[in-house]
Image: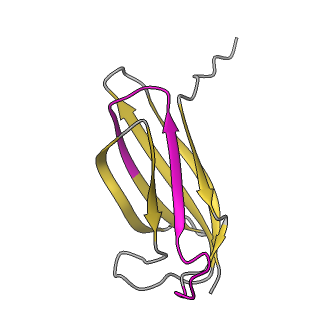
């Protein structure tokens, strides 16, 4: 019998399409999360459509039960990334032995 572990975390991206052109409309991606257990350590990575890591947004930071992080569309060098589909990966673990990897896609449109 196949056993599927229960996911204890959830996250959403708002808006799904954003344009970091600083015109005041959907300039940043908000990565909203909620966990069912406390004391989570979170890392967030941004990959382009080819699967190449372009940005480490957060690395092993303590996160409360719920909240959000912001991606401004920049890559590791501070330049605005190209238009396209991006994969946001959220890795988490806590002292209860729970952990996992959550993925969502978004579109950066210039």
Residue at the outermost top position: 1
Q: Is residue 33 left or right of residue 95?
A: right
Q: Quadrant of residue 95?
A: top left
- Name the residue nearer the viewer: 63 or 84: 63
Residue 55 counted in the magenta span:
no
Q: Residue at x 31, y 53 (%)?
A: 59
Q: Residue at x 64, y 65 (%)?
A: 15
Which quadrant: the N terminus?
top right
Q: Is residue 93 above or below residue 102?
A: above
Q: Is residue 108 above or below residue 65?
A: below
Residue interval drawn in magenta: 21-43
Numbered-mark total: 0
Q: Is residue 49 above or below residue 79?
A: above
Residue 80 image offset from top left, x and y in percent: 47, 84
Q: Residue at x 59, y 69 (%)?
A: 50
- Name the residue nearer the viewer: 7 or 26: 26
Residue at the outermost right position: 1
Q: Quadrant of residue 20?
A: bottom right
Residue 61 image offset from top left, x and y in percent: 29, 47
- Name the residue nearer the viewer: 8 or 51: 8
Which quadrant: the C terminus?
bottom right
Q: Quadrant of residue 86?
A: bottom right
Q: Is residue 7 above or below residue 71?
A: above
């Amino acid at each position: 019998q196949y056993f599927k572990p229960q996911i204890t975390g959830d996250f959403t991206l708002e808006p799904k399409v954003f344009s970091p052109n600083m015109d005041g409309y959907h300039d940043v991606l908000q990565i909203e999360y909620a966990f069912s257990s406390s004391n989570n350590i979170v890392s967030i990575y941004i990959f382009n459509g080819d699967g190449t890591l372009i940005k480490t947004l957060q690395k092993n930071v303590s996160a409360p039960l719920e909240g959000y992080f912001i991606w401004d569309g920049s890559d590791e060098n501070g330049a605005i990334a190209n238009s396209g589909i991006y994969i946001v990966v959220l890795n988490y673990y806590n002292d209860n032995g729970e952990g996992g990897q959550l993925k969502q896609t978004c579109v950066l449109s210039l």
